[in-house]
Amino acid sequence: METARGVVLATERYGSAESWKYFAKDAVMERRRDGSKGESRGNSIVGAFKSVFLPQGYPESVSDDYLQYQFWDTVQAFASSLSGTLATQASLKGFGVGNQEATVAAATITWLLRDGTGMLGRILFAWQKGSKLDSEAKKWRLFADALNDIAMFMEILAPYFPACFILIVCTAGIFKSLVGVAGGATRAALTVHQARRDNMADISAKDGSQETLVNLAGLLVSLMLIPIVTDNPILTVSLFLLFTVLHLFANYKAVRSVVMETLNEARLSIVLKGYLRDGRVLSPLEANQREPVLLEFRKTVPIKLGVRLQEVVESPEDLNLALRENNMPYLLGVRNGCVCVCLGPEASVHDEIRAMCQAVWLSSKLSPPTSRDPPTQNNWEMVHESHKMMDTIFKPFLKGVEAAGWDTTRTLLDWDEWRVEWKTKNH
């Protein structure tokens, strides 16, 4: 193609950004930006900002919800930075800064006690809840930030209760250690979701740059706040509550903006119940909007996945009942108020999804308000009914799930590691 500038030899583009053209004129090759000169300065500034703070290849290299999540995450980080400044000032006062009667040894011991209890809390929490942080990343992310606000509020109040100061700061230290585990682990889970080109490290690094920039802005604001709030507890608490409300609101909006395409228990339950109700499979966006993001006390019958055989059956007769109407590589049973699923070693991801669908259906049948009526079937009859139902609906349901945009190559279901091989029933 020939233009006034010469013959166009080639056109190149960096990602979805601006394009450049190579011209040949008078045996010389020249590279020019494709666009007017008025756009070049703005484009260069925006391009520099993107290269510093956004992952390479943005927006194609990240999930569609990346920008909205990062915006609200930036707002919450700014609010948390300001709250942290107020809490740090109160803690230093409680440790004896500015008090001539306080000793270095006493302050050091208090500091070490706080850090030591926090370390123990971190280990225990990771042991007890580590596997839950992947399957329920949104809930634990919001929980971590709410707990962080509670811990900072305790640190602000601690200097006004000198008799209980060590107890309060140690408890706050434990809370903050839980925040460190839950916040860090769930952020890693969200990074895996956001990465579309196996670029988790780049996304994590740029998230660190964004957070550093926000903390710098928070530091500048804090320098102006400190002289105002010093020796003014009412203003300190008032500002802290204001920042906390902003922090929690931004966190809620952040986790609500995340649209995960992988199925966990909550999302699968929402999709399955919608399908059974009206025959339509909800899209990831619709299901994520309905997914609860607050930790709650269960009103449904709990589901245990990947349990030992003895948690499903307790006799050879029970094993025969579990195998009736069942040709799948898993066993279901209802024991001690729980729906338990025992998985075989050859089970595929689709088998895991099917088993979870059956468990969700059984749990809903056994849970209030449906369980207020006297049961007309015993537990094993309901298990057999669930097998028959899945034989009918699961294949079209799975096709609908895949067509709706869900990722069925992996799940975020909370399976334990027990795998059982059993003998089939003798006929």
Image (tube, rainbow, N blue to C red):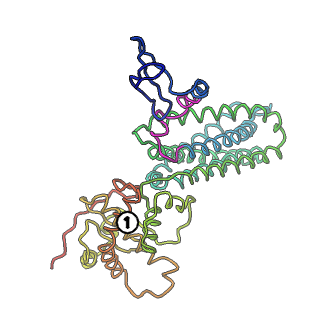
Q: Position of residue 203 (x, y in %)?
A: 48, 37
Q: Residues within 10 Å of mark 1 (few under 14, many from 20)?
A: many
Residues rendered magenta in the picture: 46-66
Q: Can residue 19 be found in the magenta stretch?
A: no
The kind of residue on which mark 1 rests is Met
Picture layout, residue 196 above or below residue 257: above
Q: Position of residue 423 (x, y in %)?
A: 19, 69
Most distant residue in the left direction: 427
Q: Residue at x 75, y 35 (%)?
A: 96
- The quadrant in which the C terminus is found is bottom left
405 or 315, which is in the foreground? 405
Picture layout, residue 212 above or below residue 383: above
Give left or right: position of 180 versus 356.
right
Q: Which residue is mark 1?
A: 356
Image quadrant where residue 52 sits = top right
Q: Residue at x 58, y 52 (%)?
A: 142
Q: Position of residue 164 (x, y in %)?
A: 72, 48
14 or 114, which is in the foreground? 14
Give left or right: position of 284 versus 378.
right
- The quadrant in which the N terminus is found is top left
Q: Position of residue 177 (x, y in %)?
A: 57, 45
Image quadrant where residue 312 sits = bottom left
